Image (tube, grey):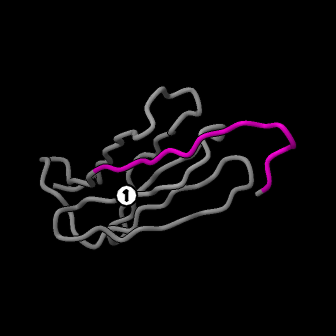
Amino acid sequence: MLAPVGAQFKLRAVSGVVTDMTGNPLPRVAVQLQNTRDLSVRSYITGKDGKYYFSDLNDDIDFTLKAKYRDYWSKPKTLSKFAPSAHAEVNLVIPID
């Protein structure tokens, strides 16, 4: 996506851990990051540690994060363009024990 001439934006990143309701990290979870402006989606599959990472995100756009494990989805969380951090941490919980 091209920015308007003269527009200034910075890149940021988001990472986190996907866990079950008791706090155990979940491997092989599909984490989806949706750009709320153009609705494009990027995906990341967590490793054994349940961690995910997305980089090169425009800091002038909100993003929605959610995770799917088998037939279960986490509640979506929003990474706001007003968040002050260049590297946000957003943890997601899948509603299983």
Crowdedness near tag 1: few (<14), some (14–19) or many (≥20) residues, C-alpha within 10 Å:
some
Is the residue 21 above or below the residue 1 in the image?
above
Q: Is 8 within the magenta?
A: yes
Q: Residue furthest front?
A: 6
Q: Secondary structure at mark 1?
A: strand
Q: Residue furthest right?
A: 5
Secondary structure character of the magenta stretch overall: loop
Nearer the observer, 72 or 90: 90
Quadrant of the frame with the N terminus: bottom right
Residue beneath the point at 35% across and 50% down = 15
Looking at the picture, how far across and down is residue 75, in whole percent? 42, 46
Is the residue 57 above or below the residue 72 in the image?
above
Residue beneath the point at 44% across and 53% down = 66
Residue beneath the point at 47% across and 55% down = 55
Looking at the picture, how far across and down is residue 48, in whole percent? 17, 70
Magenta segment, which residues? 2-16
Is the residue 69 above or below the residue 8 in the image?
below
Tally the numbered discs: 1
Nearer the observer, 87 or 44: 87
Q: Is 10 within the magenta?
A: yes
Nearer the observer, 14 or 10: 10
Q: Is residue 53 left or right of residue 25?
A: right
Q: Amino acid at mark 1?
A: Tyr
Q: Is residue 82 left or right of residue 65?
A: right
Residue 89 lies in what quarter of the image?
A: top left
Q: Which residue is mark 1?
A: 53
Looking at the picture, how far across and down is residue 36, in whole percent? 67, 47
Quadrant of the frame with the C terminus: bottom left
